Image (spheres, helix red, strand yellow):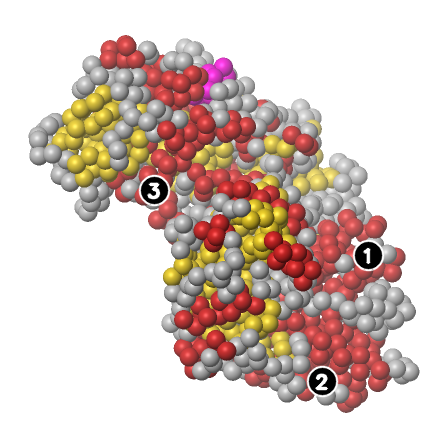
Amino acid sequence: MARTTQGSEPAAPGASRAWEDGLDEPVRRAIERALPAWLAGRRWFGGKARPVERVEIVDAVPIPMGPGLARLALLRVRYAGGGEELYALPLAFAPGARAEALRREQPGAELAAATAGRERGVVYAADREPAFGRALLEAVARGGRFEGSAGALVAFHGAALERLAVDASRLEPRPVLAEQSNTSIRFGDHLILKLFRKTEPGPSPDLEVGAFLTDVAHFPHTPPTLGGLEYRPRHGEPLALGVLQAFVPNEGDAWSYTLRAVAEALERARGRGPPPAWDGHLLELAAAGPPEWARELVGPYLDAAALLGRRTAELHLALAGARGHPGFEPAPFAPSDRAALREGVAALVRRNLGLLRARLPALPPEVRRPAEAVLAREGEILGLARALGDQELGSLRLRTHGDYHLGQVLWTGRDFVLIDFEGEPAQPLAERRTLRSPLRDVAGMIRSFHYAACSERSNSPWAHAWYRAVASTFLRAYLGAARGAAFLPQRPEELRALLDLFLVEKAAYELGYELDHRPEWVALPLSGLEDLLGRAAPGGAEEGDAVKSKRATPRAAAPRAPAAPIATPLPTPAVLHAGGPSDADLHLWNEGTNYRAYRALGAHLAVVGGVAGVSFAVWAPNAERVSVMGDFNGWDKERHALRPLGASGVWQGFVPGLAEGTVYKYHLRSRHAGYAVDKADPFAFRAEVAPRTGSVVASHDHAWGDEAWMRDRAARNGLGSPMSIYEVHLGSWRRVPEEGNRPLTYRELAPALADYAVEMGFTHVELLPVMEHPFYGSWGYQCTGYFAPTSRYGSPQDFMYLVDTLHQRGVGVLLDWVPSHFPTDEHALAYFDGTHLFEHADPRQGHHQDWDSYIFNYGRNEVRSFLLSSALFWLDVFHADGLRVDAVASMLYLDYSRKEGEWVPNRFGGRENLEAVAFLRKLNEVVYQEHPDVQTVAEESTSWPMVSRPTWLGGLGFGMKWDMGWMHDTLGFLRHDPVFRKYHHNEITFRMMYAFSENFVLSLSHDEVVHGKGSLLGKMWGEDRQKFAGLRLLYGDLWAQPGKKLLFMGGELAQGQEWSHERSLDWHLLGDERHEGVRAWVRDLNRLLRAEPALHRHDFDPAGFAWVDCTDAESSVLTLLRHGDEGDADILVVLNFTPVPRVNYRVGVPRGGFWQEALNGDAVVYGGAGWGNLGGVEAAPVAAHGRPWSLVLTLPPMAALFLRGAG
């Protein structure tokens, strides 16, 4: 039963005793059934647009509240498309007549009818109950703690509350009835308690920044932060649930105050002609100050705008003084910060202009006209977004407000008070806590002034003049107050570029929000974009015709939904012979040392001579003519010819006016035999969805949020770190049968796969090749797009989102990469320019007979540049944490899968492919030099020595290698009838003869469940129950052995049928306790692996392993010890490979004490019979197996035991 401490009091008589004692199962079920529909009716619920799969009560913390007891319920909302969110909701129970009164007094609060014990009544949302607010306030004042079943609600306060000297017990709570994103409870004219409805693990920026401004910076223009509430689970990060602040008497928010000022100004302008011309950039207007007529128009509000500018600068100066405070310390812009900022805004612009283009036909005519005007200037808008270029930024980043607009400011009648530091609600927590340029706050307020000005008459020239006067005055005061601060750019060009960038970002974000929520307001952000571009004097349309005369809310806070690129037919321009690869790029390319050729070759968005377009560059040394064609020129093969760049073999040209989303191909005419062909771009960043084969101009705009992962990656990826890899084929992991059995998109996969990997305890996922491949049935292993994630599941940005999401959830991403061969499709690399360019010309070295594919010519310099660039591309651009190199054995041997006479010996007469060996060594040297915190893994099935040893020792340089021997021997052993296993005992012990010769990954991969091999479950001996036991034993052995772990998807489900890429995994099996038991076993093995250093710290060191007894063939029992560092607990593993339980089985151990039974594969929860050792065994001082102590164990049948010794 849950209990309360500190501040608890017995519930008043008449309350339901059953409700007080805890949520019994019928009440819990009733609430959980009612929650999806109830939440959908709440304006603050963020998941209304997503189908809810179910809502679970994670905890229901009891909070005594005078005449009864409330429960603060922590709700996990799971969505049908994957992903989940956490919400906090106070609940109470009203029995009998009280229920009827509640329905009258608090309409909409009722959640569900329920019977608690013997009392019928209703469960309702208790946030309007004054007693609930009083209970929480008293808890904050006292430092109270309320215990729940899975964690505790903790209340705390700072010194500021004590300084305030308010008697909290005397303050009457008054819940704010307006439905807001948070619940607010006001206590007289002294305090306000804000409860967060939606929460997530980690600190609240509102509480964090507020406490800093109150207790450290002593900033006077924000309500003092006095205390807070958080839920602390038994395991994991706390969840912020509320913040207590001093109440500031006020006349309302600055938005309302500003709207009144706008109305007064427009009334003053009534009947006048147009305002005088007043053009220029806002920075220029700010420097000059407003003219007299503008002062007269705006009136007293001009002084208020200047005051708000000063208060904003003072806020930033206070935050900039955070030296030595973790999370607040100002920092310079790194090149990666600059690039992420620039490209992130550009991506947002493209997405929302794409959305505008798609919605254009549905817009009213008066809105469509300005929309078309803005779309026609998309290149100019992107130019503003990218105006930063590569210039070094000298200003600092710091913690900022994060969501700054007039609605986040209170007007007291004399001054401004800045509130709500939570950041943009739709952004992830890590994004809201990041350091930024404070000019982003400045831009947010400027855009808010524009919204206020246009809220009544969007096209009024006087409204526009009011906006420019107020915005420039605000900016002038801000720059004056912040002059000389390290966060303020000192160079005018940096100041202008950053301010423009953030103004574009805000306007583009508003555009997406209005398109999704208020199409009639679209003209406002369009007007903002036109203003940034320098539009003609306003006029032409009647005042107010583009936007209905009704008031907007000051914030557009919708999630930024991506829109697919749309190729727009453009006029056919000439090809400009400008731009393209530099001489250095070409030299390194031809030399075989251009490791990032993807930056120079292919199709790149560029600006040449002030004109935006696309630069194309392709390597075709044996072509006599190359042209680019596409939807922009009607696929004309002649019109857009490229130029040869000297003797490099590269052809290049710049086509003005082209944009992202343009579909194109190269037309090549060879010097040989009049051969002509249309080819996809080998360096294309995106391809059309198969079966179409065109290349697509694309960028890599994405605002990454995985900084913490990338910073700590070396520790997570190291050879001494726990590594359990979940191998996934994206197209068949999960499907949508209601929509033609389609696979999930990258964005749909992101939350679902991340949640599942975290739930199961996997440290990494390994994706079967995502590189573009025309034949879906190849699973990606016949790749044609070495620089493009397959478009089957979305865009490059969508794939970035998948990787980013996994990283933010603490899951690494390994990619299968295939440099061993490529398919013969005519549109791709094969016979590219009428010659064998990428492949070896001799079919005995260039054609793979098993796969009917071509083998790369590893001796050719440009091919090495191509492949090495591809490897770094996935690490550089997509933040991959490693590459699993496919089919390495086929690269190493010239006679691989060939008969005598079908292969050509090397120059020494041997069978080794010396060029491929040199390439693999160079690959690993380059990867580890550029990204020392990633891993390369070889799928190498022969006995080639030193695959995972450094190249300077003569090795191939891989970080790890798959252990195919363990997989083959163990699966073979488990097929044997247990009666005969004693005759094959060496099959399960032989591995330790070579286990430390390489850094091994023990893999149960996709290769073991395809091509008629059946499922892993089907390979096990025996009838149904014994097969499940055998599978659990196989996994127990896998996790017990030294080496990293890999399991193909579906293995954890004990899937009975062979995997097929055409259907989803058999998720329905989890309704069967046998399958659910195997999944739970894998989950708990992963948890033990991560928790116990002995199971991962020395996977590649003999010091981390010892046999206790590997000779008991008669009983088919293996006993081994795993060791960590000094002070770490040893793990004893006993594997019984027969269906016979063994009692009184003595095993030697190195030390005395209690050995805890950490895991038992025969536990009932895993589907076993329940044989075991009642939680553990005390060691006796009886020598056995050469050790001074021993345990007498009960060995469950066909099961693995893991016992933990004392550390």
The amino acid sitting under disc 1 is Glu
Cα–Cα gap, marks 2 and 1: 35 Å
Estimate how packed mark 1 is, as few (under 14), some (14 to 19) or many (20 or more) residues with alpha carbons within 10 Å.
Answer: some
Q: Which residue is mark 3?
A: 1090
Q: Position of residue 864 (x, y in %)?
A: 47, 36
Residue 1192 in view in this figure: yes
Q: Is residue 216 visible?
A: no
Disc on the earlier residue, 2 or 1: 2
Whether 1004 is among the magenta residues is no
Res 619 quadrant in image:
top right
Q: Amino acid at mark 3?
A: Arg
Which x, y percent locates residue 587? Answer: 50, 46
The residue at the point 71 percent across, 79 percent down is 257
Task: Say above or below: 691 vs 45.
Answer: above
Tell me where the magenta segment starts and ends, as one range.
Answer: 1005-1016
Give the residue pinned by disc 1: 372
